[in-house]
Amino acid sequence: MRKGVMRPGHVQIRVMDIEEAVIHYRDRLGLIDVGRDAQGRAYLKGWTEVDRFSVVLREADEPGMDFMGFKVVSSEVLEQRKQDLLRYGCQVEVIPAGELDGCGERVRFDSPTGHYFELYAEKEQTGKWGVSENNPEAWPEDLKGMRANRFDHCLLYGDDIDGTAELLQSVLGFQVSEQVVDREAGELCVASFLACSMKAHDVALVRYPAKGKFHHASFYLDTWGDVLRAADLISMHDIALDIGPTRHGLTHGQTIYFFDPSGNRNEVFTGGDYTYPDHPVVIWDAHQLGKAIFYHDRELNENFLNVVT
Amino acid sequence: MKFSVSLGDEGSSFHCGEQQNLLEGMQTFQVGVPLLKLIPVGCRGGGCGVCRIRILSGEFETKKMSRKHVSDQEQAEGVALACRVYPRSDLCIELLSSAENDNNHSERESL
């Protein structure tokens, strides 16, 4: 049952050199640069996103993800979910409005996999970039690089993915869309893909021995042609490629993976399945994991499975 | 200018230019020589720790590396991520496991 959590709204990513990172996310991914704050954090967004920002880059000594935020439908829902999180036993911290430029009060909570998530109800709405709200043209002409549409989801690695998946479902109303299950290890859940919308996933979790790991942040493109064009740009700019262009079995998205200059993985993808509330969970058997991850190669890739920040 | 990079006990080596990091040097094509996979290749951005090594001898420069994988003290002792190491002389190196496998740095960075 949905509980008023609408969509992934932002991700704060740690980078080791903020200027290098801004060039990557702005000029290569094609995100819109919406400015810096007093702490020196850089704010960006995909051009179709109506809120002021969705990606925050923070310079730090080690890369990774600080937190992922979801927007809820109203301040009342924010307060209700905060009470629910406290009752559930989460450590909850209220971050005052304005700590992120243009963002209202945020409710930050920890999770069994060691990731921090946030909820918020208000963010300055600046509208889609480069097109009008009235009679909008199809796209703005002066986009850069891969012309990423929007920040779409994160994939996170951690130990107790059952615990985090349960938290997201029971407290925040997420729905499991797909799972990878190891039947030979007592139905052990190896991966869990969850949606709060009708997308194939809004956040994904993969079992891993360490807590709080960041596998990738993903951005949506319009077409398979755009994924191939992204691959060309990756070569033109000598960006570290991970794998692709290819198709996933899980969610069936068409995809390519690469790394930002600090080693954080990015995905750009298009297509993929959808999730209605009455859909059964799609199950992938762990012994088919090669095909579940890379539908064409059908081979497990050591780097994709084990390289994280 | 190219330098020789040799791996401790195994007697394997490759050449690496001063503008190349060690992984780029390792992956350079040479006629008749098999592509080397001496050092594991990960994110190539100093973030994931997969290519963690110790430089036993020689001069080199480094770019910024994740403190999660190379602490200040380790860096002073020659530990580095190969994707961020640029040789300034012939080097002798050994492979290390990533820091987290050693459980040295299990604490999460606080926000």
Image: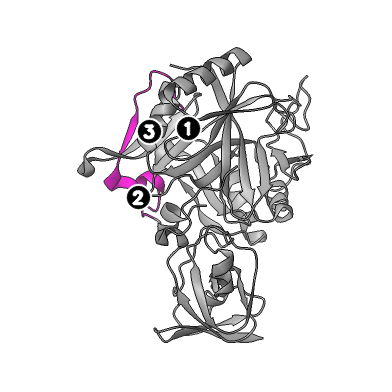
Residue B30 in view, yes or no: no
**Amino acid bearing label 1:** His
Mark 2 lies on a secondary structure that is helix
Binning the other alpha carbons within 10 Å of mark 3 as few (below 14), some (14 to 19) or many (20 upward) gives: few
Q: Secondary structure at mark 1?
A: loop
- The residue pinned by badge 3 equals A163
Look at the image and give the residue range highlighted in magenta: A274-300
Position of residue B9 relative to residue B48, above or below, is below
Residue A193: x and y in percent read: 42, 34
Mark 2 vs mark 1: give the one in front.
1
Q: Which mark is residue A290?
A: 2
Residue A201: mark in rendering: 1
Query: Which residue lies at the image location 45% right of the left edge and 20% below the top edge?
Result: A87
Q: In the image, what residue type sits under mark 2?
A: Gly
**Residue A276 colored in magenta in the image:** yes
Chain bearing mark 1: A
- When the figure is inspected, residue B51 is found, relative to residue A145, above or below; the finding is below
| Quarter of the image where the N terminus of chain A is located | top left
Residue A225 position within the rendered picture, expressed as x and y whole percent measured from the top left: 59, 44
